[in-house]
Amino acid sequence: MASGIARIASAVLALLLIVSAGFAQRFRAQEPEDEAPRPNFPTQSEFHFIRVEYTDLPEYHRRWSYASRNGTGEGWWLVDWPDADDHFSTGVQRLTRVDTGDPRHFRLTDDRLFEYPWIYATQTGWWGLTDAETKRLREYLLRGGFIVVDDFWGDEQWENFRETMNRVLPGHAIGDIAEKDSVMHVLYDINEKDRTFIPGTRHLRVGPGGSVRVYQPEGTSPAWRAMYDDKDRMVVAVNFNTDVGDAWEYADSPMYPEQMTALAYRYGINYLVYAMTH
């Protein structure tokens, strides 16, 4: 087992080198002409990264406009797309035997949702799910689905997320993930020391000589939480006050802390393997 873990650790380091060389180097927003083409993935596979499109709270709705290959779109669901999806999918492809295909995105109410065991939603502190979206997410989770939510911050966003999930799964609490929970050990061993702040690029400060310092906003202690169904199966993984998506998005950047990207891959792949085996 120890040798197997050592091989996995070596593979993580190799992945980071490969990703860094294989994608356009970027740390801040690129000009359209600097963008590299998206990687090619199979279109028929057992795993596709599914990014969920959802309705924003009206007062916080945001329009995101992208040039060139990224097109245009609206809503907080777009944050970190498509690089986070592409880089994480590349990681799954290289670090596991999971047959990995092209990342996709569609509405929560899309009937295709039930074809996929694992979905991802970012900025869920600003979502304002409609009754139809709430009903569909409940059905998806109770039929065996798994959702990872990420990159939302502070008391106001937490309260909105908590109230929304109380409508989705009434009577099911949101609690901290225990260190002994199988999701923390299904492939990688994630321990208490790993419950650390994973920064977004907005939390990085470049100093003299190109050194990078992590700035953690005051009062934003990272939390790794979850919800479980009536059979005690985890159905919602909650990354709160931390930004796993940015660690995937900037996996190709020499400026982003390598150890944070490696940790983000470990969390994401553990969630995926758990979702596909439970």
Image (cartoon, rainbow, N blue to C red):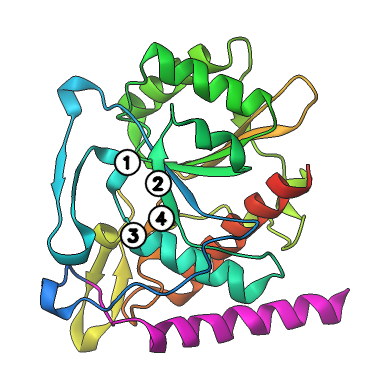
Total tally of numbered discs in the picture: 4
Q: Which residue is mark 3?
A: 82
Q: Are marks 4 and 3 in contact (CB under 8 Å)?
A: no
Q: Nearer the viewer, mark 3 or mark 2?
A: 2
Whole-percent x, y for residue 262 in the image: 54, 70
How far apart marks 4 and 3 lie (CA) works out to: 10 Å
Q: Earlier in the sequence, mark 4 or mark 3?
A: 3
Residue 149 relative to residue 219: left or right = right
Residue at position x 75%, y 83% in the image: 7
Q: Is residue 56 above or below residue 44?
A: above
Q: Amino acid at mark 2?
A: His
Of residues 74 and 262, the one nearer the viewer is 74
Task: In the rendered structure, find residue 105 and report the number of the disc placed on it.
Answer: 2
Q: Residue 181 lies in what quarter of the image? A: top right
Q: Earlier in the sequence, mark 3 or mark 1?
A: 1
Q: Which residue is mark 4?
A: 245
Find numbered disc 3 in the image and state the secondary structure of the residue it sits on: loop
Q: Earlier in the sequence, mark 4 or mark 1?
A: 1
Q: Is residue 80 above or below residue 240?
A: below
Q: Earlier in the sequence, mark 4 or mark 2?
A: 2
Residue 36 relative to residue 164: left or right = left
Does 264 lie within the magenta span? no
Mark 3 residue crowding within 10 angstroms, few (<14) / some (14–19) / many (20+): some
Q: Amino acid at mark 4?
A: Gly
Region rendered in magenta = 1-27
